[in-house]
Amino acid sequence: MPNEPYSSVDSTFIHLLGGPVVSLKRYLIVRNIVIFWMTCVILAAFLLPIPKINILEHTARNLYFHVPMWFTMMAAVFVSAWHSFQVLKTGDLVPDIRALQAARVGAFFGILGLLTGIVWSKFTWYVGTDVWWNFDPRQSMVSLQLLIYGAYFVLRSALDDPDKRARISAVYNLFSATTTPFLLYVIPRQMESLHPGAEGNPAFSEITHPVMRLVFYPAIIGFIGLFWVVYSQRVRVALLKYRVTRDPEL
Amino acid sequence: MINILTLLPPSLGQLLQDAQDAASGSVATAYDSVWAGAAVPIQEMSGLEDVMLSDDKIFVVLAVVLIIWVGIVILLLRNDARLKEVERSVEERISAFDDGL
């Protein structure tokens, strides 16, 4: 690892170790589009009429907010795994910064998805019971996945040398990324669950009204964009920390 | 559900019991007489109320969510502004330091 500092911040780029790392111009454009886009999504989510369904009623609108949390977490896992792969390929420190921050923000969205799911199910399917958590396979598997990512953060905190930490945690991060699609999508579909597409349940594509898709798909794009904004901010803070302390861990 | 009131010390339990009775309307207390005695305002719904109370009051939720969203956006923008400031000042100071080595 070359021991040179990052060279400069000009009006459009942050440079590290001789190469541009963050494009501030692209960041600003994406950020402003995401803000406008998400405002439209929120308005549409509440203002467009939806079909009335028993049990769900207005809570069907949670589709626009709860479900994109999982798509966002999945996207974050891809970003994180990609950069961990780059760490192993090149040995650079910058992809390690990106892998960690993507995993952190992704896990945050996962926790939001879990909490919103708990509230949603309590006041629909579990109404009239004292049940908040019923070991729905999807909830259980997702909790397991979040624990796997928790171990990633703990592993990192146990290693002091930045280069060694980058390599070892990249290997583990590729493992946690590999388990994600199975725990989020494959296994829950084989078991009885409240979620669409599970054993005996119709798939999402069979039951969802076109009006709801009109908001749902843009909501996924918007939340993934929001992830990207927060993730980029954290990468910039990590670069600053690296610049000052020579250790980018954040 | 276990009645949590039975687990508390008697005086506190009584206090909570009173509050619960008052809330369910079985016992009148000084707290709710203000509301019970007050005349319910009977007037034409204003334009805003007309909108906010329609459709199962969903627009109230929309208003709340929009306030939260605007707050998050302001937070993002302020973070960016501060980040830029710190990036600049760190760069100025550390560059000078590196040059001195």
Image (cartoon, rainbow, N blue to C red):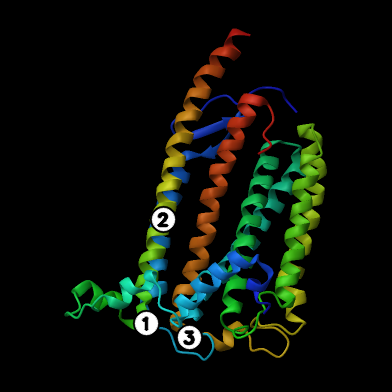
| Residue on which disc 1 sits | B56
What residue is shown with label 2?
Answer: A35
Residue A27 position (above or below residue A239): below
In space, the residues marked 2 and 1 are separated at their CA atoms by: 28 Å
Residue type, mark 2 in image = Ile
Q: Position of residue A155 (x, y in %)?
A: 80, 45
Q: Amino acid type of disc 3?
A: Glu
Of marks 2 and 1, the one in the foreground: 1
What residue sits 38% from the left and 69% below the top?
A: B31
- Per the image, the residue denoted by label 3 is A57
Q: Position of residue A26 (x, y in %)?
A: 46, 45
Identify the residue at image location x=66%, y=80%. Answer: A130
Q: Quadrant of the N terminus of chain A?
A: top right
What is the x, y in percent for residue A185? Answer: 71, 73
Secondary structure under the numbered disc 3 in the rendered image: helix
Choose top left, top right, bottom left or bottom right for residue B99.
Answer: top right
Q: Is residue A122 visible?
A: yes
Relative to B4, is B52 on the left or the right?
A: left
Q: Residues within 10 Å of mark 2 (few under 14, many from 20)?
A: many
Disc number lying in front (2 or 3) = 3
